[in-house]
Image (cartoon, rainbow, N blue to C red):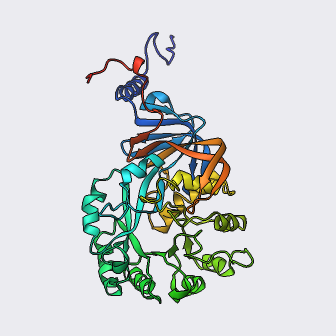
Amino acid sequence: MTIKRAGLQSGMVPRKIILLAAAAAGLLAQGPRYDLLLRGGRVLDPANNIDAVLDVAIAGNKIARVAANLPAGQAVKTIDAAGLYVTPGLIDLHAHVFVKGQSGSLLPDDSALPAGTTTVVDCGTSGWRTFDEFKARIIDKARTRVLAFVNIVGQGIAGSEAENNVEDMDPQATAAKIRQYREILVGIKTAHFERPGWAAIQRAVEAGRLSDTPIIVDDRVFTNSGRTTRDKLLDQLRPGDIHTHTYNDRQLELIDRFSGKVQSYMHEARRRGVLFDLGHGAGSFLWPVAIRAMAQGFPPDTISTDLHAGSVLIPQSDMPNCISKLMNLGMSLEDAIRRSTANPARAIRRLPQIGTLGEGRVADLAVFRLRTGIFAFKDSWGHKLTGARKLECLLTVRDGKIVYDAEGLGFPVWSTAGEYSVIP
């Protein structure tokens, strides 16, 4: 009797293996899985508790993978980010980008994208009367994501006469405008009110209540204002409301002038949920205030620039510069990135839609170099401090596309890139 062995004849391959091999070949034939791959950078994504050397892969306009050792051959374009920092695109909570008349605003693509800032929040340049023009002229045309606090003053930032007109501070109209553009408008701004009393803040708070949004306050506490820092923070503002210009002693009496200590009501306000924003600008970052506050453990909750025509050149208050100043006062880079991404996104109720590198989220990110040396940093009143660390933006990706590349990290070398299709 002959017993036949179960098995394969020589040279035969099981049908299942053939099908698997064919499927794999098909996948390879489809080409790269990713449009852009940043390899080997130190990824700082505080919203997801990530601080590690990883690769970031982008497909279309979304973050596809954040993982170690992704194959370079799977991407159309690969960028070597070794030795650099990869972060979510920065969020500037206080900027001015409604370019109208003599407002001093800056176009967002020119001022934000070179600084690794993919989202700017215009801080009250427009009011409920002027927002539609702002949207049509700037927001709808910008590559930068532009959100906005709408001014409680219907005309917006339009000079002293307009901004002191209580009759133009309409909570119902302001709230209605926010409801109309809920995807863009994140809250209410009140600023530059020179008359005594609380009318501007109270009307802004009422608009915030009607629209279920926070307010952000730029408000003087001069003796003739009839307003004090303590009453403003503890009696007028609600949890989640924001006071900008934290290190300007004309806006907040943060440091007691006699003892040099952070006022107790500042800590009390923070405990009850009031947020403090940097809002550097041309007059609102003072070394004597910032140094004392940082040394006593009172950093801003959010880092922002108050960037406009008066603060872009001499104070140079873009986001990397503001971050660098706080780092040289003791803040870690990781903490500064948190206060420039996750924290502002949370403050305007946009986390995790923005401010993270979470897989499936829009691909907004920045690549930075941290330099060491001796650098001069200027405050808003023309005084400087030397520091040893400086953050510089090298590359910005907005909505999956490289929109700024300072050193050509994403460029091929011309001599090996192949023929030019068109020579000018």
Looking at the image, the residue that sits furthest to the front is 382
Residue 156 is left or right of residue 332, and the answer is left
Q: Quadrant of the C terminus?
A: top left
Looking at the image, which residue is at 67% across and 51% down?
Answer: 386
Residue 33 is left or right of residue 249, and the answer is left
Q: Position of residue 265 (x, y in %)?
A: 65, 81
Q: Is residue 66 visible?
A: yes
Q: Position of residue 199 (x, y in %)?
A: 42, 88
Looking at the image, which residue is at 35% across and 18% down?
Answer: 418
User: Which of the 4 quarters of the picture holds residue 307?
Assistant: bottom left
User: Which of the 4 quarters of the picture holds residue 332?
Assistant: bottom right
Q: Position of residue 397 (x, y in %)?
A: 42, 44
Q: Is residue 375 above or below residue 294?
A: above
Q: Is residue 421 above or below residue 180?
A: above
As rendered, which of 188 and 239 lies closer to the eye?
188
Q: Position of residue 378 (x, y in %)?
A: 59, 55
Number of marks present in the image shown: 0
Looking at the image, the residue that sits furthest to the right is 259
Looking at the image, which residue is at 42% across and 60% down?
Answer: 308
Residue 67 is left or right of residue 424, and the answer is right
Looking at the image, which residue is at 52% across and 74% down?
Answer: 243
Q: Is residue 337 visible?
A: no
